[in-house]
Image (cartoon, helix red, strand yellow):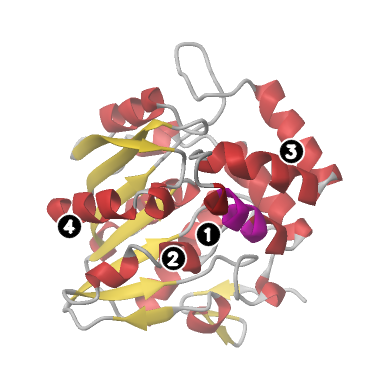
Amino acid sequence: MVFEHSTGTQGSMTSIQRNNVKISGNGSRAIMFAHGYGCDQAMWRAVAPNFEKDYKVILFDYVGAGHSDPTAFNRTHYSTLRGYALDVIEIIEELKLEKVNFVGHSVSSMIGALAAIERPELFENLVMIGPSPSYINDGDYVGGFERSDIEDLLEMLDNNHSGWSAMMAPIIMGNPDRPELADELEASFCSTDPIHAQHFARVTFLSDNRVDLLKLRARTLILQCDKDAIAPVAVGQYVQGCIPHSELIVMDATGHCPHLSAPGVVTEAIHNFL
């Protein structure tokens, strides 16, 4: 089934239904949490509730993740990160929100940036957790991976989804002394439909949004773990150098998912920034 996208709806489906949007909190300001690759909105459970007193908290699942509507998947629309950014904009418009504080983990950092570039009036602040505008090394730019590394990872994902999940989850999560965190991430990866997982992986790991960062004008906080196998500190420094109104905090934390492994540190940093 193919759905055509239009402002506020996708076919007869609302963005609220499509993206399994959940709203909580009593504040007048809005804060939106966007999950990373292979995850869903449940990954924010240790951070998002801390903002319900002062904010209207919006959680959602990207199409293909969590409890989003799988029939909404459109390979053409989601062929680039901009398709996911347009979905974010649709959610904000449907909820009639203004000046949203957008918190994006990993690939959602770039999705949030693209949305804020396209519709700057909808966003007040951006928080990027472990952002990477490009995962592939390029000349002096250090993305953390050679292109052949990424191609090998994508090929393995295509051929053995569960094996890829079991191998990558501990690397992405870090914190080997807390294996339950890697187990949770592996379970999240495995629960994603392989077709959606493979597609989103290619869009995520082969994207290059370095030029886009120069267009971003929103006030931005970059949260970077000092030990991250997916997005090294050099990437966070690069992102900070590209965004005019930005601040970089290198946290004493390990892994690519500090909202799970160090939620108190992440929550405090976001609160202080906002």
Residue bounds of the magenta highlight: 182-188
Image quadrant holding the N terminus, namely bottom right
Three-letter amino acid code at the position of disc 4: His
Q: CA distance from mark 2 to mark 4?
A: 22 Å
Residue ID at (60%, 41%): 170
Q: Which residue is mark 4?
A: 271
Tell me whether circle 2 and circle 4 mark residues in contact (CB < 8 Å).
no
Three-letter amino acid code at the position of disc 3: Leu
> Would you say 240 lies left or right of 206 here?
left
Residue ID at (27%, 65%): 122
Q: How many marks?
A: 4
Mark 1 or mark 3, earlier in chain:
1
Identify whether 66 is placed above or below 274: below
Q: In front: mark 2 or mark 3?
A: 3
Mark 2 or mark 3, earlier in chain:
2
Q: CA distance from mark 1 to mark 3?
A: 20 Å
Residue 156 belongs to the span the image colors magenta: no
Identify whether 69 is placed above or below 273: below
Residue ID at (74%, 38%): 154
Image quadrant holding the C terminus, namely bottom left
Residue 183 belongs to the span the image colors magenta: yes
